[in-house]
Amino acid sequence: MTLTCFIRYQIDPFQRDSFKAYAEAWGRIIPRCGGHLVGYFLPHEGSNDVAWGLIAFDSLAAYEAYRTLLKTDPESRANFTVAQTKRLILREERTFLETVDGTFNLEPSPGRA
């Protein structure tokens, strides 16, 4: 079973570029610490203060190991500090979702536009 941590961020819309840099840093940190980064997503149309992050794990134990590594990873700690200092994130919500087998990470079928 794969679990996905679905993170909903309410961000300061005037610091969108800073949040983007914060998210890009997780692109290096998360895989190094054991998470499968599905991606970070910034607002494009509609609400301008909601962003998303999705990180998958093979199990809850894998998530717990990942969280332990994040606490000791220097780049991770620095990234958290930047977000707190700049107050990029106004609110953060986490939901854990179970992946439905046969639906995760599928590539498009050949010959489809």
Image (tube, grey):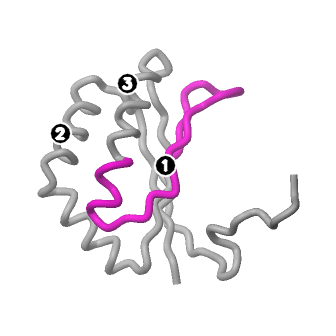
Observer-nearest of 21 and 45: 21
Report how far apart the C-alphas of labels 3 and 1 lie in the structure.
Answer: 15 Å
Query: Identity of the amino acid at label 3?
Result: Ser
Residue 88 coordinates in the image, percent (x, y): 36, 27
| Labelled disc at residue 78 | 2
Image: 39 above or below 43: below
Instruction: Please state the horizontal and vertical placement of residue 37, each as a whole percent of the image.
Output: 45, 58
Q: Are marks 2 and 1 in contact (CB under 8 Å)?
A: no
Q: Tell me the kind of residue under disc 2.
A: Ala
N-terminal of the two: label 3 or label 2?
3
Kind of residue at disc 1: Gly
Of all residues shown, which one is farthest toward the top? 14
Q: What's drawn in magenta, residue-wise?
A: 27-53
Instruction: Find numbered disc 1 in the image and state the secondary structure of the residue it sits on.
Output: strand
Residue ID at (81%, 67%): 109
Residue in view at x 60 percent, y 24 percent: 48
Residue on which disc 3 sits: 18
- Is 12 a magenta residue? no
Mark 2 element type: helix
Tell me which corner region of the image, top left, top right, bottom left or bottom right, holds residue 42: top right
Check residue 17 in the rendering and tell me which mark sits there, or answer none: none
Residue 91 image offset from top left, x and y in percent: 42, 37
The residue labelled by disc 1 is 53
Residue situated in front as seen by the camera: 97 or 73: 73
Location of residue 72 (image quadrant): bottom left
Q: Residue furthest front?
A: 111
Residue drawn at x 31%, y 26% is 87
Disc 3 crowd, CA 10 A, few/some/many (<14, 14-19, 20+): some
Image quadrant of residue 46? top right
Q: Is residue 9 above or below residue 12?
A: below
